[in-house]
Image (cartoon, rainbow, N blue to C red):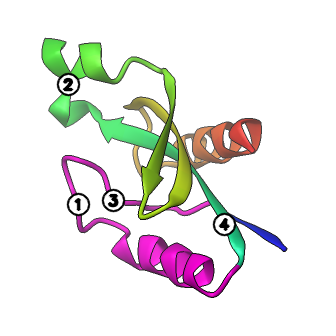
Amino acid sequence: MHVLVVPSWYPTTEAPLQGIYFAEQAQILHDHGLTVGVVYPEQQSLRHLSWDALRRKHFQTAWTTDHDVPVLRRYGWNVWWRAPPGMRVRVRQAVRLA
């Protein structure tokens, strides 16, 4: 069985404890023999916008691994943080990645 995790939060380099519950659950499922993948549209707050951050995270897609669990990330900037349009954008990006 293949389990696809689409978390609302997931650990990042800037916030390694954010969404740790989702990462731990994916790891536990993987340890019990299931094929697990994570799709995470990683939206950064505009408060953290800088030239360096924009160079590192400019709407690209990247595969990473988190303790042998493949993670597909879509980096971007969250213009409508905590607003209904922002949630729709996050859901749309997650569906496109999956």
- Give the position of the N terminus as an image quadrant: bottom right
Tell me, yes or no, whether the two marked residues, 1 and 3, touch with CB atoms within 8 Å. Answer: yes
Amino acid at dot 2: Leu
Which region shows up in magenta? 6-33
Mark on residue 16?
Answer: 1
Mark on residue 11?
Answer: 3
Amino acid at dot 1: Pro
Q: Which residue is mark 2?
A: 49
Q: Position of residue 46 (x, y in %)?
A: 26, 31
Element on which disc 3 rests: loop
Mark on residue 36?
Answer: 4
Q: Nearer the viewer, residue 46 or 98?
A: 98
Q: Residue at x 16, y 12 (%)?
A: 51
Tell me, yes or no, whether the two marked residues, 4 and 1, touch with CB atoms within 8 Å. Answer: no
Q: Residue at x 66, y 45 (%)?
A: 94
Q: Residue at x 21, y 56 (%)?
A: 15
Viewer-nearest of labels 2 and 4? 4
